[in-house]
Each structure stands twice: as C-alpha cells, then as structure tokens.
Image (cartoon, rainbow, N blue to C red):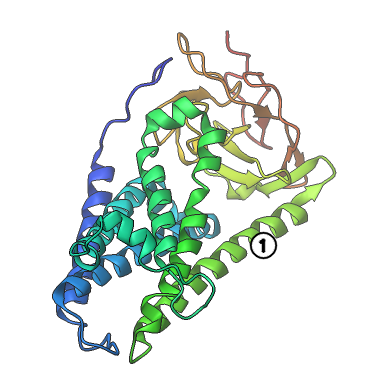
Amino acid sequence: MSVKYIPVQWNPNKWFYDAIMLAGVAAFLWIFLHITPDVLGHERAINPQIHNARAFGACAFVMLTVILCIGPLARLDRRFLPLLYNRRHFGVMTAFVALTHAGYILNWYFNFSSSDKYVGLLYANSSFGQLAGFPFEVFGIFSLICLLILATTSHDFWLKFLTPPVWKRLHYLIYAAYFSVAAHISLGILQDQQNHVFTALFLGGAGAVIVLQLAAWWSERGAAAASAKGDWVAVADISAFREGFARITRLPNGDRVAVFLMEGQLSAIANACAHQNGPLGEGKIIDCLVTCPWHGFQYDVRSGRSPAPFTEKVPTYNLRLSGDTVEVNADANPPGTYVEPLALPGATPQGSEAPA
C-alpha cells in the first residue's frame, strides 16, 4: 500500500482470469467460423470476409452480455465475486473484438468505394425515415465509441485521476453501449436470416441481462427494507460470523458495511476502500488490520485508519445486539473515528483500548 497512486501489479489470479477469457474468445470464434456456417443460415450466401465480421460481432455481443451479467450475479451470490474483480480486463478485450468486427466491415463493404471508406460508412445509407433498411451502422458506431472510451479509461490511473464517483458514472456508458448493440443487431443481421438460431441467442442474452439486473435490484431492496428498524439495520445472527472475516450488509441508502469478527468482538467499517473502492469485506483480518483484496491497502477495523505512516481512512459504524441479532447503525461515523468493539456474549475482550 502507499500514500500515493501506484500501478496495480499483475498476480496469478489476473493471469488465470485472462487466460480463461482468451480461451473462451478463441473457442467462440472457432465454433462460429468452422462449425456453425450451415446453422446460421442467411437469405443470401455470404463470403468469408462477411462471415469473419459477423463472428467477431457476435462474439462482442456475447462478451457484453456476460459482462453485464457478472455484476448482478455477484450481488445475488458471493461465489461470483472473483469474476467481478477483474471485469475491466473483460471490457478491454470486448473493445478489441468489437474493433476487429468494425475493421472487417470497413475493409470489405466500403474499401472499394469511390469515396473515402469512412465517409461511405456514414453516408451510404441515409434511410432514417423507415424501419426496414434503417441505417443500423450508426448504432454500431456509437457502441464502438462507448467501448473504446471505457477501455481507454479502464486503467487504475483514470480511476484515481477522475475520482471513483466520476469514473463510475462514466462507466455507466456500458449500458448505453449494450442498448445500442441490441439496436444494431435487431436492425441488421436479424433481418437477413433463414432461421432463428441467432435470434434465439440474442433474445436469450438480452433477456438474461434484464432479468438478472431486476432480480439483484429487487433482492437488495427487499433485504434492506426488511432489515431496517429505524436507524438500525440487521446484519446477521451471532452464529453467522466467522473469526477474522466479515459479513457485508447493504444499508437503505445503498452503502455497504463490512462487520468483522475479531477475537470475539465485532467492528464495522465501510466496505469501500479509500484507494479505489475495493471490497474490504472480502479481506481477512490479521493483527486488527483488514487488507483490501484489490490492491493491498490496510485498515484497522476498530478505527477505519490505515497504519502509520499511511493516511487513508474509511468511515466506521456503531453496532449493537438485539437478542442474538447483530445490528448496525445506518449513520456512518466520520472516516477514521474509533469505535469500541462490540463484545459477543461469553467472549473475553482483548486489546480493546483505542489505538494511538
């Protein structure tokens, strides 16, 4: 950890994640190019260049679908969290695949035009007043621009430079890109098929994104509403806590709190790391310090402070017991505020004095 920005180093998890992703992309392209030509029928025969373009276009759509499914899956089931941590790598690869698709299109459809191929792309079809034959290319161009912006700003430098709130809002462009891709496909390839194999895949992927996003929103909304009691929110039963680990709870205002069990005592801090919003609740406590699983920043769970000489701080929260249920106050304390740990019944408190 550091008091200033440092590049995030590669680790075995990142290498494994990227290897699986690249293998999946290669497998999809190979199947599309060599196994499915007869399955994905078209009204007119297509040449290899067009088939290559459609292979990369279909791959980009599938990758976008997977990216937008990872977030809600991780919110519904913690076992999907490892897929979430390096999702930005997935997004960068998707941008490259989409760019390859655009390259094939430009170099086949417009390369032999008497005018510049980029000019031809924009002006060859201007039938904006009709649905059949609508210039679906504009949706593809917009999606590609969005993906390139997201890929360019995916590096941690931009997250630090723009600040997490601005960076997060910028990366909501992924939803606009997906909507535009859906329009691009609907007005393009779906109107030039003999069967509906790809149509079914397209509708299934888009439907999965919508259903999972709604399910995650409804689950978190219902859990927050059911657990709230005035200013206090139920976290879990005492028996649900594991020594050295946290239970993560979503507050009614959308913030998340990590409640750690340490030597028979409970302490609560904000789940978002002060460095780049990494999930502190996924870390493990060692000597009162929890280590962020993203970039290694550490915090004392009793005060939310990084050990000297580092200066990062996160908010802390007050806890109480209601029978056998642990509850957290929804109002956060200022970052770095020491809170006396909550001793569980039968536990022997150790080292509860405030840190220097």
Confirm whether residue 288 shows in the render. Answer: no
Mark 1: which amino acid? Trp
Residue positioned most to the front: 114
Position in image of residue 27 (x %, y %) = 20, 68
Residue at the image point whose x is 48% and y is 69% from the top: 183
Q: Nearer the viewer, residue 185 or 270?
A: 185
Question: In the image, 184: left or right of 89?
Answer: right
Name the image quarter holding the N terminus: top left
Position in image of residue 33 (x %, y %) = 17, 75
Name the image quarter holding the C terminus: top right
Position in image of residue 223 (x %, y %) = 69, 56
Say above or below: 67 vs 279: below
Question: In the image, 325: left or right of 164?
Answer: right
Question: In the image, 177: left or right of 18?
Answer: right
Q: Quadrant of residue 136?
A: bottom left
Question: In the image, 28: left or right of 182?
Answer: left
Residue positioned most to the right: 230
Residue at the image point whose x is 51% and y is 41% from the top: 170
**Residue denoted by label 1:** 218
Secondary structure category for the residue under label 1 = helix
Residue at the image point whose x is 52% and y is 58% from the top: 72
Confirm whether residue 95 shows in the render. Answer: yes
Residue at the image point whose x is 45% and y is 27% from the top: 160
Q: Nearer the viewer, residue 250 or 199?
A: 199
Q: Residues within 10 Å of mark 1 (few under 14, many from 20)?
A: few
Position in image of residue 132 (x %, y %) = 47, 81
The number of callouts visible is 1
Say above or below: 336 vs 105: above
